[in-house]
């Protein structure tokens, strides 16, 4: 269907549109017009991706600037889905408009997924593929070949040089499969095609890391212009991605391998001095002049890039004392020896970077400045030495990155040395963590560089947490609900068992027999009444294991066994994949199955239990993080001091976003229905931190239930759902045709003066109610009441 | 026992290469869990602390490691900071060099010069580490240190060139020919060093900020020969403790001559003269009036 938002013609590839999709597009357009960042929450399964793509593509094609879209998602499968949606959309557009638009949409993923080289693609590990690819495609290898030496090259990569550099692949949308096929036909490398075509694309779809991880971003995303539209989809975990991309853990093993790498480098330098001293001399001369080699600017086979250095520093010359290769190698040796010495402590050490640097200077006379250039200098050296087996130098690279990070940032980082793995261990196994505490550091360049960044996900409540944590300002912040004709999901909070004892995963109570039995009874009851699949989430693997063994003793598992097949998630990815496959099979034929998994595990993010695969989800206990972790403690302290976010607020927010993710697993669309049970008394106080669309279904009569009350409600709900129902019933209300949409637009225009803030109008568009400031003053912005301290005490040791 | 063995196994993995065995007495950590290794910076040979006690406690002795004939003193022994003794030695040498070569980036005119300096320092350190004309380098270092010291003193006290400050001049980049050829090859010279300028001598502190408070129009005398004044001196009202006749006179005189420095004509002339600020203000107003659109008339209604 084709409709107009203001004067912008939008082609939407479906004949009907949901009201919330329309509202979502309006908000997107508002953001793009104004320029600025926005945070949007829309329930999963309401067609977020397609509304996003169709609006932005319409926007691109309508306005002459043709702003590029960078769409970042989390997993491979989500990226593929988005590519497929985009392809369908462009096909629809071509059909509607009657001509093919000049348009390119490409996805980028790792070499491992896009390699065509017959032997390289058979490698299992991604790093090996990367390394082997580099050894076949690097610039100096080619030079060698031209000089007549006998070296192997990748044909697929070489063929690219024969093509026009801006037209490596015909216009259109290319999925990964499509790219592979095209590459095979034309004998050209899909990976490098995608990389080199990025400046000429209208839409780029890739993973967060290509934009957020400074080690990669610098290489991949450098040339993207300022007016790009950046979208982070499924962004509820974006702060953790940011933090991980700047955190490094060093173990003794890494250091040992790094030492080996340094010794190797030393030998290589000596070799080269005797055979080809000129090259080293050239490099030296370049470094003296402070020139970054011209070919370096666009270097796709670079060993690694600099993690987030300010630009002015990048153009500065490398300090004199690490200019010569042998000096630099000795410098690295000294630094690694220092780290080794430092790791021999027997108690935990937490240092800020300035403290660390001071101690370092005192012991080894390494100044801050050369340390800062460490990563860059190593890259340059590796290039000069023409090393091909780069995977051997991985640990060394880690150490160099560590050095650069530690010397670059004074605040927002902490160095924690933990000599023992656990509190009870006696054999030291030290780990040195460089943890980034501030999620804003990694994402700051993105917000600064691009003037429209859209952060969106199904679960982002409370919305204002993200701008605070990531330190940016929004022009639009909106939460959408699901407009439903019939209430198709039933959220409930169960806080006590039939014997009136509480249900909670609080640390003091979690091992009480009664609590465990109540959890067990809850499981039995819901297994009895649910048709098909049941998914159960526990706060941690540890608790899951302990409760399963307790249930075994109480014969609870035997009872469950009568109704459902029991499957358990494990930390091992392959075992879990097998369990999931069995789960699906059992749901497809038979009485269904129950999957016991962990709220922060692989299942809780990214695996959908649509329709009969998930009719009930049980969240047993509040999924708090392990609060005794030193890293988490440091981060909490940092958040409190820098962004004024209280510890309890953050922990609670983090727990609730994971709980919401778990609940969202079962509703994957408007046709779907399911029961969501939150089993912990502490959920009662945290209702307001759930996404608006779940809150909407959570009325007073479905909170503070006992197990049998919940069972009653669930049975009634399932009965209601079993009434035959056609899609036609929801037309006009929760799904609009073109006429209805235009009708709505007219109505809205008539209401013009009261605008979108009109509550009735907002509800019609599926917007959530605006949060009002609570009158009683005791309630803070997350709706947590005065008993927050008690809450905090509760959570002090959950998740052990 | 088995637990201890396990721990020893874990630890030995860490130091597998030359292990936990003392190279002198061959006893291992397995038998002596409190064993500690020491080194002497004269030769950097590792030995356990019992050996050190045994051999060196009674006085200087030869290093027991075969082929090393150095005489070592007991007090020179210490624990090694680093596992790698090469690095330990390197760091010791660096400590020595850094003590002398401690110029900062601010001391140089350009970054390039500073980087060249850093490289030179690195070269010197390497010469020492690899024993390349070590003695000469050592000598150079010593001399440089002395010069540095002299320069430090010269900067504070005197500016006239003596023999030592002449060489400082050499280091500062303004290289006089005559000085350059006497022994320049044995000394260091760094390009681009900024000239050290002594801070201007501080003037003595003046609490009045240059304002003269001495009286110009009268001189306060010790006594005045007037009869009412003589009478007053014997008046009990003026004899109470803490009251001073001198103060009284000084105040009376100050008030009497109070307006003498002020010339009313000057003040009037200054008032009539249009001030600089007013002129600027009207110019701006005129410019604004011409451009027209930028005039912001604040109307409260």
Image (cartoon, coloured by chain):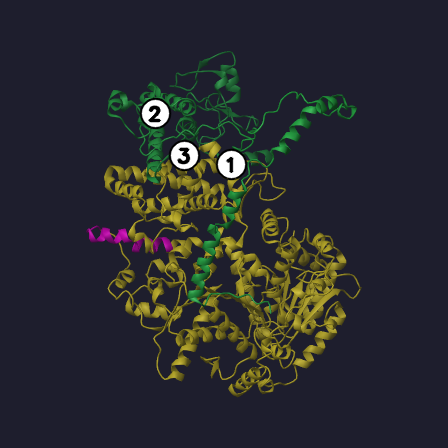
Crowding at dot 2, Cα within 10 Å, few <14 / some 14-19 / many 20+, comes out as many
Colour green, chain: B
Q: At which x and y percent is residue A730?
A: 60, 84
Judged left or right of residue A694, residue A237 is left
**CB-based contact (under 8 Å), mark 2 and mark 3:** no
Q: Main SS type for the magenta part?
A: helix
- Mark 2, residue position: B168
Subunit that carries the residue with mark 2: B
Secondary structure found at label 1:
helix
- Chain part drawn in magenta: A130-149
Report the side of A586 relative to A177 (left or right).
right
Q: Residue furthest front?
A: B227
Number of the front mark, 2 or 1: 2
Give B61 or A661, whichever is nearer the viewer.
Answer: A661
Q: CA distance from mark 2 to mark 3?
A: 17 Å
The residue tagged 1 is: A342
Where is residue A401? Give x, y as percent: 43, 46
Which residue is painted at 52% across and 85% down in the image? A742
**Is any atom of residue A589 visible in this view?**
no
């Amino acid at each position: 269907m084709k409709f107009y938002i203001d004067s912008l013609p939008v082609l939407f590839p479906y004949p009907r549109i949901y009201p919330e999709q329309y509202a979502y597009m309006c908000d997107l357009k508002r953001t793009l017009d104004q320029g600025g960042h926005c945070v949007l929450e829309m329930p999963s399964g309401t067609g977020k991706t397609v509304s996003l793509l169709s609006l932005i593509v319409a926007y691109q094609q309508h306005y002459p600037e043709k702003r590029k879209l960078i769409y970042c998602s989390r997993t491979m499968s989500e990226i593929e889905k988005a590519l497929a949606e985009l392809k369908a959309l462009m096909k629809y557009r071509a059909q509607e408009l009657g001509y093919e638009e000049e348009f390119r949409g490409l996805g980028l993923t790792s070499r491992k997924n896009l390699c065509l080289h017959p032997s390289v693609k058979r490698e299992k590990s991604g790093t090996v593929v990367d390394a082997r690819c580099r050894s076949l495609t690097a610039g100096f290898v080619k030079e060698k070949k031209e000089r007549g030496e006998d070296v192997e090259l990748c044909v697929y990569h070489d063929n690219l040089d024969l093509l026009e550099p801006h037209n490596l692949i015909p216009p259109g949308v290319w999925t990964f499969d499509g790219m592979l096929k095209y590459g095979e036909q034309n004998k050209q490398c899909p990976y490098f095609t995608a990389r080199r075509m990025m400046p000429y694309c209208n839409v780029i779809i890739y993973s967060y890391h290509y934009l957020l991880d400074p080690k990669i971003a610098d290489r991949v995303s450098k040339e993207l212009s300022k007016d790009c539209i950046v979208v982070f989809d499924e962004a509820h975990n974006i702060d953790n991605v940011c933090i991980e991309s700047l955190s490094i853990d060093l173990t003794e093993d890494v250091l040992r391998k790094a030492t080996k790498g340094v010794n190797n480098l030393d030998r290589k330098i000596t070799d080269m001095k005797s055979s080809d001293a000129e090259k080293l001399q050239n490099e030296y001369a370049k470094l003296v002049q402070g020139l970054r080699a011209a070919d370096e600017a666009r270097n796709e086979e670079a060993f690694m890039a600099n993690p987030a250095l300010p630009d002015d520093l990048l153009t500065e010359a490398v300090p004199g004392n690490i200019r010569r290769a042998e000096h630099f190698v000795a410098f690295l040796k000294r630094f690694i020896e220092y780290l080794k010495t430092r790791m021999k402590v027997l108690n935990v050490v937490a240092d800020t970077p300035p403290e660390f640097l001071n101690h370092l200077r005192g012991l080894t006379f390494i100044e801050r400045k050369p340390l800062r250039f460490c990563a860059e200098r190593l890259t340059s050296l590796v290039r000069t030495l023409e090393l091909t087996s780069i995977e051997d130098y991985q640990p060394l690279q880690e150490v160099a990155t560590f050095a650069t990070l530690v010397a670059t940032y004074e605040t927002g980082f902490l160095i924690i040395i933990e000599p023992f793995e656990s509190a009870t261990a006696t054999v030291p196994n030290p780990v040195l963590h460089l943890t980034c505490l501030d999620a804003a550091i990694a994402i700051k360049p993105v917000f600064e560089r691009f003037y429209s960044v859209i952060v969106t996900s199904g679960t982002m409540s409370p919305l204002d947490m993200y701008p605070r944590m990531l330190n940016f300002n929004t022009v639009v912040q909106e939460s959408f609900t699901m407009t439903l004709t019939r209430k198709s999901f039933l959220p409930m909070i169960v806080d006590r068992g039939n014997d009136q004892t509480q249900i909670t995963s609080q640390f003091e109570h979690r091992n009480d027999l009664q609590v465990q039995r109540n959890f067990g009874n809850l499981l039995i009851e819901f297994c009895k009444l649910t048709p098909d699949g049941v998914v159960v989430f526990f706060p941690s693997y540890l608790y899951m294991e302990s409760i399963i063994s307790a249930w075994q003793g109480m014969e609870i598992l035997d009872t469950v066994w009568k109704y459902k097949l029991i499957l358990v998630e494990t930390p091992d990815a392959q075992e879990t994949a097998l369990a999931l496959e069995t789960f699906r099979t059992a749901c497809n034929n038979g009485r269904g199955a129950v999957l016991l998994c962990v709220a922060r595990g692989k299942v809780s993010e990214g695996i959908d239990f649509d329709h009969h695969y998930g009719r009930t989800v049980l969240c047993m206990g509040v999924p708090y993080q392990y609060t005794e972790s030193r890293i988490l403690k440091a981060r909490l302290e940092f958040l409190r001091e820098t962004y004024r976010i209280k510890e309890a607020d953050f922990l609670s927010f983090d727990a609730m976003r994971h709980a919401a993710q778990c609940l969202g697993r079962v509703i994957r669309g408007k046709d779907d229905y399911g029961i969501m049970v939150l089993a912990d008394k502490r959920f009662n106080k945290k209702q307001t931190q759930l996404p608006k669309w779940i809150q909407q279904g959570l009325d007073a009569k479905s909170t503070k239930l006992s197990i049998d009350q919940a069972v009653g409600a669930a049975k009634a709900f399932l009965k209601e759902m079993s009434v035959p129902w056609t899609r036609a019933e929801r037309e006009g209300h929760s799904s609009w045709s073109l006429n209805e949409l235009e009708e709505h637009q007219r109505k809205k225009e008539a209401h013009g003066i009261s605008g979108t803030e009109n509550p009735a109008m907002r509800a019609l568009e599926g917007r959530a109610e605006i949060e009002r400031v609570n009158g009683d003053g005791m309630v803070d912005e997350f709706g947590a009441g005065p008993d927050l301290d008690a809450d905090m005490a509760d959570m002090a040791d959950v998740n052990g | 026992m088995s637990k201890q063995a396990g721990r020893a196994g874990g630890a030995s993995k860490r130091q597998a290469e030359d292990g936990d065995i003392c190279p002198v007495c061959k006893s291992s950590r397995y038998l002596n869990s409190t064993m500690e290794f020491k080194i002497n910076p004269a030769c950097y040979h590792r030995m356990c602390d019992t050996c050190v006690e045994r051999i060196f406690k009674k006085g200087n002795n030869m290093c027991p490691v075969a082929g090393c004939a150095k005489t070592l003193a007991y007090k020179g022994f210490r624990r090694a900071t680093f596992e790698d003794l090469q690095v330990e030695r390197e760091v010791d040498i660096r400590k020595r060099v850094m003590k002398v070569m401690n110029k900062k980036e601010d001391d140089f005119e350009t970054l390039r010069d500073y980087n060249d300096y850093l490289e030179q320092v690195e070269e010197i350190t390497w010469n020492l580490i690899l024993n390349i004309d070590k003695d000469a380098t050592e000598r150079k270092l010593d001399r440089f240190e002395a010069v540095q010291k002299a320069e430090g003193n010269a900067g504070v006290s005197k500016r006239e060139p003596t023999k030592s400050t002449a060489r400082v001049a050499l280091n500062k980049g303004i290289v006089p020919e005559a000085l350059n050829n006497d022994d320049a090859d044995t000394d260091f010279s760094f390009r681009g060093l900024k000239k050290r300028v002594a801070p201007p001598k501080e003037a003595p502190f003046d609490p009045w900020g240059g304002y003269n408070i001495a009286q110009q129009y009268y001189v306060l005398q010790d006594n005045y020969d007037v009869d009412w004044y003589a009478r007053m001196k014997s008046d009990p009202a003026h004899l109470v403790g803490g009251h001073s006749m001198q103060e009284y006179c000084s105040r009376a005189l100050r008030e009497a001559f109070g307006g003498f420095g002020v010339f009313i004509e000057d003040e009037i002339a200054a008032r009539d003269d249009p001030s600089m600020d007013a002129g600027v203000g009207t110019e701006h107003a005129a410019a604004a009036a011409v451009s027209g659109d930028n005039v912001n008339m604040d109307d409260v209604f």
